[in-house]
Amino acid sequence: MKYSIIVVFIVVLIFSCSNRPSKPKNLISEEKMVDIIYDVSILTAAKGVNKKLLENNGILPENFIYSKHNIDSLQFISSLNYYASDIETYDNIYIRVEERINTQKEQIDIEGESRDIKRKEIPKNRLRHLLTNDDISNLTDGYRVSNVRLSFESTDTDFRESDVLKVSRTTTISSAYAEMGSIDIVPNSLVEVTVFVKKPKNKSALGLRISGVYPNRVDAVFDLNNNTLKGVKSTGYFENEDASIKLINKDWYQCKIKAKANIDKVRIIFGPTDIDKSIGAWEGKSDMFSTVYLTLPKVQVN
């Protein structure tokens, strides 16, 4: 299943390298694109498992998709091209497809396990305290959190009355980050984001971003091993950017980023990264499966 999603994503990355095309007249809605890509993923996985069975039942995956969703190949490609040219928009579609697949898989796993244990209680530690997007969102100040190729794990500990989470990359070949928001603000407000991060035992860094509509954003990368700020960089409608890292006791850092935002809505992007990554692309593919222990970002708008 994961392979099929990767295939779709690689195609999208190829499209996204070019300038954004004009909006197609028959653009497929984001909701419908989620449905289509989900079905493509399911059929691609099924085709890989038993191609002959599909053929014997007269199922040609491409024709089935076009017929089911009442579209044609040109409409699909032009819509895919349009969404793919804005990687953040496509990531939102990708997240929803992945969530649907994971929900379906979890339901199958639970039903299968229920049959196997014959009404015995499922052990509470079966999922090793891994958190869903809903679980993570419930720990914020009312913000929605979307997770892109990171794992969030509870630690049953807290710092300054906030839950401490173990956050790890699950891939080295694609971008990985978490997104919190969107947050309404008054234009020209000063936006300040604070994250408390535990001092790591292994090489690790934290990336933080205050983001508007692409390419408007301000990024900072924090070296958690050396208690230093690698740098801070802004693009577009952000100014007066600043960032800092401070050791507040022997085990914990306070990482902070702030900037004046000349927009009316922001999102907070965060996640573990490799200190060798560039400041403006810290969430991109990496040679490391980085891990950090942190509290969720706190946002202050003045």
Image (cartoon, rainbow, N blue to C red):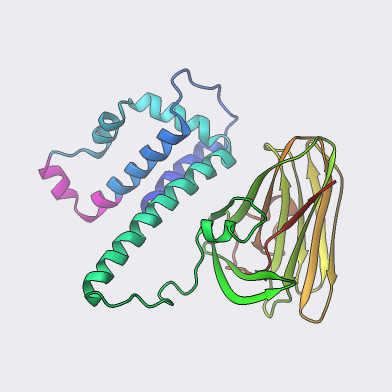
Q: In the image, is residue 142 part of the stretch drawn in magenta?
A: no
Q: Position of residue 267 (x, y in %)?
A: 68, 46
Q: Is residue 277 visible?
A: yes
- Residue at (36% x, 50% y) in the render: 4
- Residue at (43% x, 51% y) in the render: 98
Q: Is residue 2 visible?
A: no
Q: In the image, is residue 48 part of the stretch drawn in magenta?
A: yes
Q: Is residue 63 left or right of residue 33?
A: left
Q: Above or below — where is 143 with respect to 130? A: above
Which of 45/190 is in front? 190
Which of 269/20 is in front? 269
Q: Position of residue 147 (x, y in %)?
A: 55, 55
Which of 244/192 is in front? 192
Q: Which residues are magenta?
A: 45-57
Q: Above or below — where is 74 with respect to 171? A: above
- Residue at (55% x, 25% y) in the render: 21
